Image: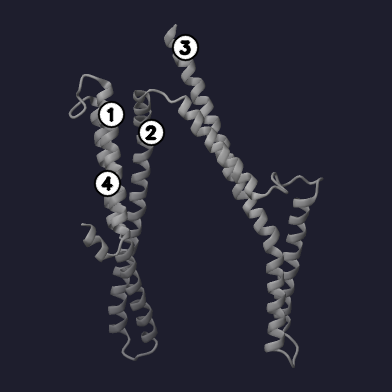
Amino acid sequence: MAERVSISSGAITTDVLIEHRREIADLAQRIKNRRLQVLGLYGTPIVIIAALLAWAALKVFIWLNSDTPGAINGIFGGVAVVLTVAFVIQAAAEFSDELGVWKDRKTPLRELRLELALAEERHVLEARRRTPPSMDRQASYKERLPSEIVRLRRESRHYRRIHLAMQWLLFVCSAAITAVTAWFDPPQPAKGVLIGLGFLVTLITAAAGYFKPRERAFNLQQTADSIEQHATALELGISPYNAGEEVRNLELFATTVEGLRAEQRMREQQLDQPQQGQQQVI
């Protein structure tokens, strides 16, 4: 009976915390939408005025003593008309009581931000009041790790693909420079091709040296493999997770994984630093 009550209480706690998270996510999305609404509502007139001033400036400084070309008039006139229509639609959605298109019309952003801060504070207080035992938190932490491993490997594949694309572009451009140099004896049109290929090779080499996609892919894959190795050892009950008490195994597992993640973040910070800074850190 006590176990059934404990399970029911845990389910209620989970539902309450999930509801708080949904409220926070909803408020965050509403703030983003409202920011775009305000930006469009007050930014569109500014863009219209800037377009009209640019149109007038072209007339004054370039075509003062002649007629402005029809293409220029058509472009600026079309832009002004489209922006004016967009502003009218946004104003109607903001101030009209009949449309009701915008959810938070006439609502200041600071009010939404205050609601978000209060919702986060309620979530923290509720989570603190309903905090489960440490063993339950460690067990749920273990269940969340597969998604973290998938994320690390996905990012690793992403950086690996970038590195391979850079290397293949570098190979092709380097070979093309040699081929173009051998094929074209006159300086034109090979000169422009060689300049473009040489610029591309320099750009790819600099980007690869600055962003270091190969090193990032290796570090992410190494961290994912290490976390998976520890998760497998915990599941099988082998060293170092072969203690008789499950609480000790979960505590050691959480400590080890957090250490691996902290080490991964440190390696990322070192890669973001200049070469001189990396040598000082090391």
Q: Write down the residue under mark 2.
A: 144
Query: Label 3's element?
Result: helix
Q: Amino acid at mark 4?
A: Glu
From the viewer's perspective, is the residue at label 1 or at label 2 nearer? 1
Give the quarter of the image for residue 36: bottom right
Query: Label 4's element?
Result: helix
What is the distance, in whole Å, between disc 1 and disc 2 at their CAs?
15 Å
Q: Is residue 82 left or right of residue 192?
A: right
Above or below for 164 versus 136? below
Earlier in the chain: of badge 3 and badge 4, it is 3
From the viewer's perspective, is the residue at label 3 or at label 2 nearer? 3
Q: Write down the residue under mark 4.
A: 263
What is the distance, in whole Å, between disc 3 and disc 2 at their CAs?
25 Å
What is the distance, in whole Å, between disc 1 and disc 3 at their CAs?
26 Å
Q: Residue at x 38, y 37 (%)?
A: 147
Q: Amino acid at mark 2?
A: Arg
Above or below for 167 versus 16? below
For the residues labelled 4 and 1, say whether their Cβ atoms are less than 8 Å apart.
no
Farthest residue in the left direction? 239
For the residues labelled 1 and 2, say whether their Cβ atoms are less than 8 Å apart.
no
For the residues labelled 3 and 4, say whether their Cβ atoms are less than 8 Å apart.
no
Position of residue 26 measured from the top left corner of the image (x, y, whole percent): 59, 40
Earlier in the chain: of badge 1 and badge 3, it is 3
Position of residue 229 measured from the top left corner of the image (x, y, whole percent): 24, 36
Q: Amino acid at mark 3?
A: Val
Farthest residue in the right direction? 98
Q: Is residue 138 left or right of residue 102?
A: left
Earlier in the chain: of badge 4 and badge 1, it is 1
What is the distance, in whole Å, between disc 4 and disc 1 at their CAs?
18 Å
For the residues labelled 1 and 3, say whether their Cβ atoms are less than 8 Å apart.
no
Q: Is residue 64 left or right of residue 151?
A: right
